[in-house]
Each structure stands twice: as C-alpha cells, then as structure tokens.
Image (spheres, helix red, strand yellow):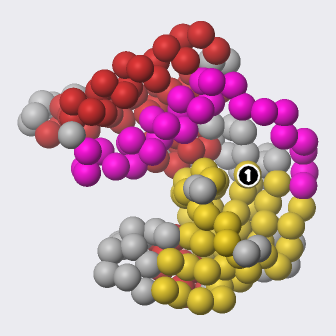
Amino acid sequence: MIYETIISSVNSHGDAHVAPFGIQLQQGLVIISPYKPSATLDNILATQHAVLNLTDDVRVFAGALTRRQAWSLIAADKIIGYRLADTLQHQELSLLEVRDDAVRPQLVMQVVHEVQHQPFKGFNRAQAAVIELAVLVSRLHLLAKDKVLAELDYLQIAIDKTAGERELQAWRWLAEKVENYYAQQAGENLA
C-alpha cells in the first residue's frame, strides 16, 4: 500500500526541500522511492535524514509541485532538518539502507522520533481529488495528454461537490500547471 505524504529534507548546507511522496510501510520501516534525479534523494543521501509529514492541507501537495509555498517550517526535534509547522503528525527518519536502482532507488528509513500534533478528522472527496491531480501533475511528462485531461474532468466532480477554500486554491494551482504544461508543449506563449 502507498501512503501520500510530504517529505521534508535538507541539503548539506541546511537548505530545506519539501516534496510530496508516496511512501510504503514495511515491518515498521518507511520506504521512500524517489525517481532519479531528485533533490529529496540527493538530500537524504547527503544527510542520512528526512521528515515524513502527514497533513490534510492539500495546498502543501499542490504548492510543492507548482512552486507556491503554502507552508511554514520549524526545526525537527531529534534530527537536523525541518517539519511542517501545521501538520497532523510528523516522523523524523534516519537512513538505514539504500536499495539502488537506475531509475528509482528505495531508501529504507527508520523512525527515530514521532509526534502527533492534531487529530485526523478524515478526508473529504475534494482533498482526495487534489491528491490524485497532484500525482498526475508530477507525471505529466510520462502520461498521455488524453488520459490526464479525462482524469482532470472526472476529478472536477468531487471538487465541485465538496471543496472548501483550501481545496479550491490547491486545485486552481494544479489545473493551471496542467494548462501551462500543455500550452508549452504546443509552443504557445502564456505571458
């Protein structure tokens, strides 16, 4: 099973990087599988640490993919790094093993510290739709345009029925990213 999370990591200079990641849990360990090249991969290999953030604010997912910072960071408790200031839960991770792969290595991480900050009240359908669109946006270069646009139309139903302000803002950011990507592919100028 894959869980959609936000991974925050730092480079060797201490600069923070925030990215959405689908992770797996295996026997109490966290498996992160970034595509090469990846700032998250480089950061974890350099520092041996990362923070897994669980949030229901889908603007963080959308903002990370569209370069709109919709979050604040604060220092992690036990490792050198940062966590989301407004998160439901965070886990500070330490690298145990690298299972190398030419395309997508697996980083096996151990939880060294975990804090629950707020209770999880559940997702609404719009939040799930934003997460699905975020996954599509992260793979625009890999997916057929027809598939992406069909999925976007279908996901729009959940947005129309259940979105609040946060979800609407995140949706707009991601939909704009899709539109701009295909305009650029067609050689259109969006200035």
Task: Name the spot of residue 71 as percent of width and height, x first.
Answer: 67, 46
Task: Return the residue found at the far left.
Answer: 187
Amino acid at pointer 1:
Leu
Instruction: Kindly identify the residue that appears in the image at 82 percent across and 79 percent down.
Output: 112
Instruction: Kindly identify the residue that appears in the image at 60 percent across and 51 percent down.
Output: 4
Task: Name the spot of residue 81 as percent of width and height, x first.
Answer: 71, 73
Instruction: Kindly identify the residue that appears in the image at 74 percent across and 61 percent down.
Output: 83
Residue 152 in view here: yes
- State which quadrant residue 90 falls in: bottom right
Residue 73 in view here: no
Task: Name the spot of residue 55 as percent of width and height, x first.
Answer: 73, 45
54, 40: nearer the viewer:
54
Q: In this view, does 104 lie to the left or right of 161?
A: left
- The answer to whether 60 is drawn above or below residue 41 in the figure is above
- Under tag 1, what secondary structure? strand
Q: Is residue 122 magenta?
A: yes
Rate crowding at label 1 as few (under 14), some (14 to 19) or many (20 or more) other CA atoms within 10 Å: many
The quarter of the image holding the N terminus is bottom right
82, 44: nearer the viewer:
44
- The answer to whether 62 is drawn above or below residue 44 in the figure is above
Instruction: Kindly identify the residue that appears in the image at 47 percent across and 41 percent down.
Output: 134
Give the residue pinned by disc 1. 54
Residue interval drawn in magenta: 116-143
Task: Name the spot of residue 175 as percent of width and height, x first.
Answer: 39, 28
The quarter of the image holding the C terminus is top left
Q: Is residue 100 left or right of residue 95?
A: left
Q: Is residue 115 left or right of residue 166?
A: right
